[in-house]
Amino acid sequence: MQLHQPFIIGARLLPALQIGDGFLSYDKGKFILDGPFGEHVITDFRPGAGAGLESQFSAVLSFLSAAADSYRYRGLDWPKVGEDDNATLFPQAVVEWAYQNVDDIDCLSLDISESSTPLITS
């Protein structure tokens, strides 16, 4: 597998993206976020049929961005028990981190989606 910027081989020796002071890695069908909040394994993401690895990374970035935007829209107030919106897609510490790094998340998503050449090749 060959990776091209912005993809890197992360500390886990897996395909990854660096987001601020954190990393989003892919390992055998699951995504792992590492950051100041610790480790968070994304277990409930299901890619669409035929989705390549680049588009899967892009989709996870979109979910992180949506959670950060929802948190911002709420005035940086965490949802009360029973409230369900995009801010609750991830644990609170991950959403707060995503909010702080939403510009990097959005730029990475744009870099991936607008690339004219494949960024991950076999």
Image (cartoon, helix red, strand yellow):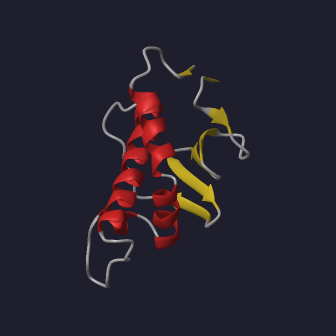
- Position of residue 97 relative to residue 63, above or below, is below
At x 31%, y 62%, the residue is 70
- The answer to whether any part of residue 42 appears in the image is no
Coordinates of residue 42 in the picture (x, y in percent): 48, 57
Q: Residue furthest front?
A: 75
- Where is residue 71? Give x, y as percent: 36, 66
Query: Measured from the top left, where is residue 26 in percent x and y?
Result: 56, 43
The residue nearer to you, when weighing 92 against 60, is 92
Q: x, y percentage for residue 30?
A: 51, 49
View extreme (bottom): residue: 81
Q: Residue at x 26, y 72 (%)?
A: 84
> What is the tally of numbered marks visible in this picture?
0
The quadrant of the rendering that contains the N terminus is top right
**Is 30 placed left or right of 106 in the picture?**
right
Q: Is residue 66 left or right of residue 112?
A: left
Above or below, 27 relative to 54: below
Q: Residue at x 48, y 57 (%)?
A: 98
Q: In the depicted view, which residue is nearer to us: 74 or 93?
A: 74
**Residue in the picture at 51% in, 58% down:** 100
Residue 95 is drawn in which quadrant?
bottom left
In front of the other: 36 or 101: 101
Q: Nearer the viewer, residue 46 or 68?
A: 68
Res. 28 image quadrant: top right
Quadrant of res 88? bottom left
Q: Is residue 29 left or right of residue 85?
A: right
Any part of residue 26 in sight? yes
Q: Quadrant of the C terminus?
A: top right
Residue most toward the top? 117
